[in-house]
Image (cartoon, grey):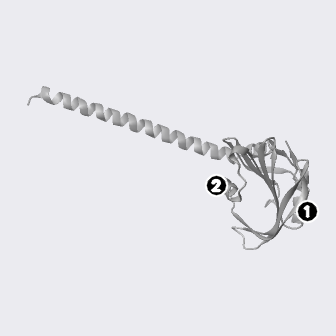
Amino acid sequence: MNDEDLRPKQLDRVKLLDWVMIIGGAIALVTTGIIGLGMKAYSNALDPKRAEAVAKSIIDYRIPGGSQGQYGIKFAGIKLAKVHSKTSPPDVEIFVMQTPLNRDTQNQEDIERLTTPLQPKPTEFEVVSAYSQNMKFCNKPIDVTIEQGNYTLEDQSSNIPAVQFTASTIVNDERLIVEVQAQGKNAKQKALTVWRSIKCK
């Protein structure tokens, strides 16, 4: 066998290596791009100004002393955001989510699945009592679930009195879910004051 007989095989090996390098480089570029987009989306979701803008695009509200965004995301027609008071630690929070009826999300587990990756400080709300009360919301009377109990922050051992108001309704052919949480002294009154300030778009 002479050198000319070996040359085609060597050329085939070079072509194969070239293709392996090209495909490997393409995969690396795509992976890097996806990771970069994911990190940017996560960073945007936690931007306070953007979070408040997302919340304000769904409802109007007023938190005494001012508010600050915690997180806000928009994807596949779903918008959700959480804002809280400027106190340290925050004593009032508003969670709002708007979703198309064809992608209805009413289940609490669905909400937690969407928001858990964005929660910077895990909390546990232990419900002691719960009842429904007919209240005005989005210019119509609906049943609002009121839960009373205690919050336990992960980095604290003491319990804090807390109240949560939750409502779900249809506005402009979209499902709207709103939760108002308040904690500390006069938690129920604080939650009620914020709840009454909410106006649907």
Q: At label 1, which amino acid type do we have?
A: Gln
Secondary structure, mark 2, is helix
Q: Where is residue 74 in the image (x, y as percent from the top left)?
A: 69, 43
Point out the image quarter for the N terminus.
top left
Q: Is residue 38 left or right of residue 105?
A: left
Q: Which mark is residue 25?
A: none
Viewer-proximal residue among 148 and 134: 134
Point out the image quarter for the C terminus.
top right
Give me the residue at 20% from left, 31% from top. 9
- Looking at the image, how many numbered discs can be counted on the residues? 2
Q: How crowded is mark 1: few (under 14 residues within 10 Å), some or many (20 or more)?
A: few
Secondary structure, mark 1, is helix
Give me the residue at 76% from left, 73% from top. 158
Q: Is residue 25 visible?
A: yes
Residue indicated by mark 2: 117
Q: How crowded is mark 2: few (under 14 residues within 10 Å), some or many (20 or more)?
A: few
Q: Where is residue 78 in the image (x, y as percent from the top left)?
A: 70, 44
Q: At label 2, which amino acid type do we have?
A: Pro
Q: Can residue 64 be seen in this view?
A: no
Q: In this view, does 152 lie to the left or right of 187?
A: left
Q: Where is residue 53 in the image (x, y as percent from the top left)?
A: 78, 42
Q: Which mark is residue 189?
A: 1
Give me the residue at 79% from left, 50% from top. 68
Q: Distance between the residues labelled 1 and 2?
A: 30 Å
Give me the residue at 86% from left, 51% from top. 66
Mark 1 touches mark 2? (CB < 8 Å):
no
Circle nearer the N terminus (1, 2)? 2
Q: Residue furthest top?
A: 4
Q: Position of residue 18 (x, y in %)?
A: 33, 32
